[in-house]
Amino acid sequence: MKNLLEIILNPNSTHILIKYISLIRYPENEKIIEFIKDNLYIICTNKYSCCTLQKIIEFLHNKKEILISISNISNLLFNDQFGNYVIQFILSLNDIEINNIIIKNYLDNFEKNVSNKYSSNIFSKCLEFCNLETKQMIIQNLCNYDSVKFLLYNMYGNYVLQQIIFASNEPFKSKYFENIAMLINGLYFYPFGNIVIYKLKCNFPELNDYINSGNNNSN
């Protein structure tokens, strides 16, 4: 075990461990899995071993324990440039218990997570793999002027806002458009504003009706 971490982190040797895990079953692989669990943060946040870990998990028959271990430190991985990919991979496995832990951790620090380049990318996976009740809760709770303003004017949050709108049904979708219409002119004062406006209008052509209606009402 002394050199195992070096093997996992080294891009030239990780294939050896992946091959071993693919051939050896529990309980023979137990010590290796325990070692990985004890060093999860280092492994998840390394450019090469984060990919190795995903391959290892794919081969494991006894995935549950390591998935729980990863979900329990998910709040440390959301904002990491490599760890966020591990979280997205875990969510895509669609284990309800694991996903609930990860999504709860994400929502507990929602503003911080949606404001980060890496963790904002996780949000679409959270929406895709959360249960219907959680999805509706997210859509409903954020469907207000202050939340829309925060997301719209944030460099990464505006992407999250678009994901929420894609997932929304009426009457919430229209409410999001109404709030955006009231706020969209403020985007011109932000360096990324023109790009966001363009994307919003391309992705949601119906938004123009709310913007035009607001302009007409103001005249």
Image (spheres, helix red, strand yellow):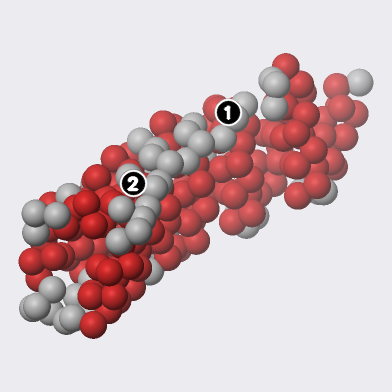
* Residue at the farthest top position: 189
Classify residue 64 by image quadrant: bottom left
Please state which of residues 133 and 66 is positioned toward the viewer in this rendering: 66
Residue 17, by quadrant, is bottom left
Q: Amino acid at mark 1?
A: Asn
Please indicate, yes or no, whether residue 82 appears anywhere in the rendered image. yes
Q: Is residue 140 visible?
A: no
Q: Residue at x 9, y 78 (%)?
A: 28
Q: Which mark is residue 154?
A: 1
Q: Is residue 2 above or below residue 132?
A: above
Q: 77 or 161: nearer the eye?
A: 77
Which residue is located at x 70 percent, y 27 percent?
Answer: 192
Q: Position of residue 32 (x, y in %)?
A: 13, 65
Please determine whether, in this image, residue 59 is positioned above or below residue 210: below
What's the residue type where badge 2 is placed?
Answer: Asn
Query: Which of the pair 191/39 is nearer the observer?
Result: 39
Residue lying at 56% horizontally and 35% vertically, measured from the top left: 156
Dot 2 falls on a residue whose secondary structure is: loop
> Of residues 139 and 38, which is closer to you in this image?
38
**Measured along the vertical axis of the image, is residue 187 above or below residue 69?**
above
Relative image position of residue 219 (x, y in whole percent): 91, 21
> Which SS class for mark 1?
loop
User: Alpha-carbon distance for marks 1 and 2?
Assistant: 28 Å
Q: Position of residue 42 (x, y in %)?
A: 24, 45
Comes first in the chain, label 1 or label 2: 2
Q: Say the numbered circle drawn on residue 46.
A: 2
Q: What is the x, y in percent for residue 52?
A: 33, 61
